[in-house]
Image (tube, helix red, strand yellow):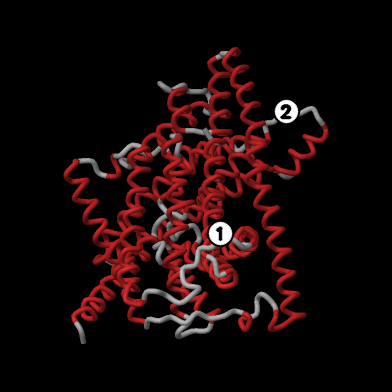
Amino acid sequence: MTIKRVILVALTILAIALMGQDLLDSWGRPQFQNQLELYQTNLLLQVTELKEADPGMVAAQKALVGEEPLKAALKQYEEVRQTAQKNLDRTQKLLAARQSKQQSLRASLPKWEELITKLDVNLGLLQVAQGQVDTAQQTWGRAAQPTQLKGAVAAAETAAILAGLWSQPPQLLPDAELKINTTLTGWFRFRALAQLYKLQQRPEQLAELQAREQAAAQQSFVNLAIVGGLPVMGALIGTTILLVLLVQWFLQGKQALLSPTGMTAWVPPWDGEIVWQVLIFGFFLVGQILLPLVLGLAQSALGIPVSAMGERAKAVYILVNYGLLAAGGLLVLYWSIKPYLPLPEGWFQINWQGKWILWGLGGYFVALPLVILVSLVNQRIWQGGGGSNPILPIALEGKDSFALFCFFLTAAIAAPFFEEILFRGFLLPSLTRYLPIWGAIGVSSLIFALAHLSLSEVLPLTMLGIVLGFVYTRSRNLLSSMLLHGLWNSGTLISLLILGNGMR
């Protein structure tokens, strides 16, 4: 065995251990999808306050929010709260049973506790809106318990303020207005401030608040129409395309687009060791060992940890981190395949001519219903756990335009460029040496999903990877899969931006 193979074996064992630990750790972290769904629910609640005289708009409003929006929102918050409590109880049991792995589990414990506290604050306001004042007092009493959790202190203080506003007789605690404005958002803030102004007998502020609420309700109506309506339309288009493809496969057989016999396999000039080398050196060694080491030393030298960075600095840090990962990975890829240059025709092809735009758009529409369906099943499996991409909550809560621009460069340009070259341009064709086309698409998609190090994202990203792989295999143009990938990430960021702005 050569020295290179010994190093590869050692790094592979280390990669399996570290990436496996990261995936296991993500099991104990809250899933971002729940938070995203609650943001949409919060916008729906704001739309319920819209006072519209036009009959057409009233009908549209009713169609958007449903028959009993408050009841539906209360049920959703209760379900998310129950799921969070189950995950908290499970984490505590694991902590007691697995002493050797306390550190990773203990890190997830305060996240669940903080989430539950914040949920209880909003849950109490929903209960009040349903006339359940006594139940709301119990909910707020539970949330107002003293806590040392940094993120939950403000929520606990707000819970005590709300309990005082709806108690008999009412109790007005110091800095109530400031803490409500700081802690609560959207519909929940308007409800709390309205109660406060009524008790303080401030009719002018109450009238101004109601005017702001109407403006917010109108904006929320538009935001929901975009965030909810456009994906539904896209999913319908994608479903139609899928049905046409399936009918074509049934009628034309081997000549159909979905038929594997119509897909030409690549002829890799290298063997599996080169694939192994690129993945371990180019992705794991660079991304999991060298970059964290270099960036960690830089942070120590500057004395500024990532957690202490401002929004702009954190966005630039993420962009630089990903740029260095991409540069390192592509250098390893080039170094690994350099002995085989020039490559046969069809490898890493980027062709600005042809139908790559149609392939990219069509693949995006097809991916929508497929990934949505898989995500629904995925939610049942992970029950609110499984972690998520750490960029998503930062982008959702981001307010700085420059920071959002950096997030867009990272997710919509840098990630599609690097990941499509690595996973579709190199890995998928290389696997056709050992697997049939659909097998290579499936395996490369699973590796693509696992590389994101989040258990809750494995199934949805595998499905997305399958669509990306099919589009690239059929179009033979990396621009088509890059476009699809960029559209997918851009759509996610735009949705987060709209939802986040709607809740401020």
Q: Nearer the viewer, residue 418 or 40?
A: 418
443 on left or right of 1:
right
236 on left or right of 129:
right
C-alpha gap between disc 2 and disc 1: 51 Å
Question: Label 2: which residue?
Answer: 51
Residue at image x 24%, y 60%? 290
* Viewer-side label of 2, 1: 1
Q: Quadrant of the N terminus?
A: bottom left
Residue type at mark 2?
Answer: Lys
418 on left or right of 70:
left
Q: Nearer the viewer, residue 208 or 299?
A: 299
Looking at the rendering, which quadrant does residue 474 occupy?
bottom right
- Where's residue 134, x and y in %? 56, 37
Residue at image x 36%, y 58%? 326
Which residue, as the protein is rendered here, is positioned at the far right? Answer: 55
In the picture, the disc for residue 238 is none
Labels 2 and 1: the sequence-earlier one? 2
Local SS, label 2: loop
Q: Is residue 145 above or below residue 79?
A: above
Residue type at mark 1?
Answer: Trp
- Where's residue 80, x and y in %? 53, 52
In the picture, the disc for residue 352 is 1
- Where's residue 21, x and y in %? 32, 66
Judge whether residue 128 can be spotted in this image: yes
Which residue, as the protein is rendered here, is positioned at the far front? Answer: 342
Residue at image x 42%, y 75%? 343
Density class for disc 1 (Cα within 10 Å; few <14, some 14-19, many ≥20) is few
